[in-house]
Image (cartoon, helix red, strand yellow):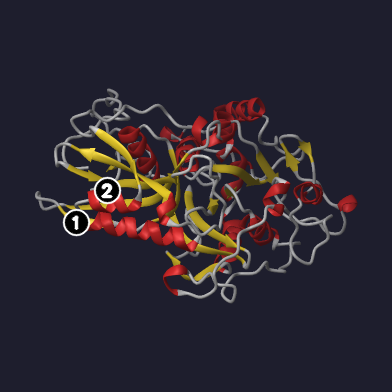
Amino acid sequence: MRSAGALVWRFADPGRAGVVGESVDPADIEVLMVHRPRYRDWSWPKGKAEPGEPIVAAAVREVEEETGVAVTLGVPLATQRYRLGSGHTKEVHYWVGAPVLAGSIAERLRAPVVPAPRGEIDQIRWARPDAAEAMLTRRGDRRLLSELASHARAGTLLTTAVVLVRPGNTFGCGAPGRGGAARDPAALVRADADEGVRAAAAVAPPGAGGEPATSDEGVLSRLGVRHAFDLVELMSAFGIDRACAARAAGARRTLAPWAAAGGGQVLVVEGEAPRGTATGAEPARTGEGRSGPAAVAAASGLVPPGQSRASGPLTQLAAEDASRPLPPQRAGGGAADPHGLSASNAVQPDAGASTGSDWVAALVRSLLVRTRGASLLCAPREAVERGIGALRGAMAPNSQGALPQDLGRAQVVVAHVAHHDGGHAVIAVECHALRTRRAPVPKEGQGEGRPRAHARSKRSAGPR
């Protein structure tokens, strides 16, 4: 049984704004708790994942159903496992959670939820950690609270995220049409996908010379289109506010639903970094017209170390991301520095190459520097492998989770990044896969009636 939830926090002082990397006294925050009348106890908001639902989407949905608070997820916390009376093992995944920003892309992408019935959750309360500890009855819940307090003291309550994803299935790799009938990708999906992209003004149209339909570069298949829509929930759960795509058509169209529904913009990055100065660089395509990576770098204020401000394959990031100061981080390890983020361990900006085949690594390094929000890059397999290599070079000594060697189709790797004045480092990694599957072809003689639609927020009985 898979369940998910979050320890949602906020500052007790409503006028206080969070700063990435800031060490926070646990006494200065409040945590969100729910009361379950059936068990007569206080606990954290959580609930069962629905069939085919990504576990992170289940976490944010259940929190909002039980508390009315829409949240985005930060670093993962310890997974709780225990045996139920029925003999089944229940596994509950938790994250650090924070209320979504009003008017953000993440908020606009959230589907309406059905509130939990009062017989299941009859009270919600914001409580200081010391009061919450006295209210909790389960040892596992108290351990989670202690873990949250450790993140507060270490300055990792607020982190950024860098997400890598491979495009959904394309006609270059998908299954053949049923009955041997030939499929025309343009007739099936190109028109609708391009129309959605134009309406959002978010993703560049294909180049005039055409693009190869190989591997991750082809037009999305029906399954790939489903992957693209399912990815929206996962992107919303982590609060993605910056998205980049390789020039391959599959990568661009995988992000089209997120851009169209949330009003976000996707920067399309060329598959090879420019050589030389801005005047001689091949421009990249964006929804706002043609602007090469060099021009993007100049606008953003972020450039790879060792490069001039006129070169480098960089995303269109806000200038304040680079200029915003970070608070000092206490030196030393132990409880105050659980991930080894002291100045001696911090990952410093890498002076790696930003031309040729290393454009992805340089791009990922520039995303790691961001001190707010969450960024995503959708790219073909070979590019994602190089991006994973860049993340591996930024891992903290005591980081949680392990990076994969590569990703399958519609698979996602999320790197949570901690910042302080000594640098930045990846302190946690998690991998997710969209659970969309091809519907089985009915065998001869079987009925062809449609199955009943799954109730999106139908709440089943039993412990959550």
- Amino acid identity at mark 2: Arg
**Residue positioned 50% across, 65% down in the render:** 405
**Measuring 71% from the left and 68% from the top, which residue is drawn there?**
352
Task: From the viewer's side, name the closer residue of 252 and 450.
Answer: 252
Q: Position of residue 331 (x, y in %)?
A: 54, 73
Q: Secondary structure at mark 1?
A: strand
Q: Which residue is mark 2?
A: 2
Residue 414 is left or right of residue 301, and the answer is left
Q: Is residue 308 left or right of residue 116?
A: right
Q: Quadrant of the C terminus?
A: top left
Circle 2: element type: strand
Please state which amino acid type lies under the numbered disc 1: Tyr
In the figure, 51 relative to 301: above or below?
above
The label nearer to you, 1 versus 2, is: 1
- Identity of the residue drawn at 29% across and 24% down: 450
Q: Position of residue 354 (x, y in %)?
A: 74, 62
Q: Which residue is mark 1?
A: 82
Q: Quadrant of residue 58?
A: top left
Front residue (pair 426, 209): 426
Q: Is residue 152 left or right of residue 358?
A: left
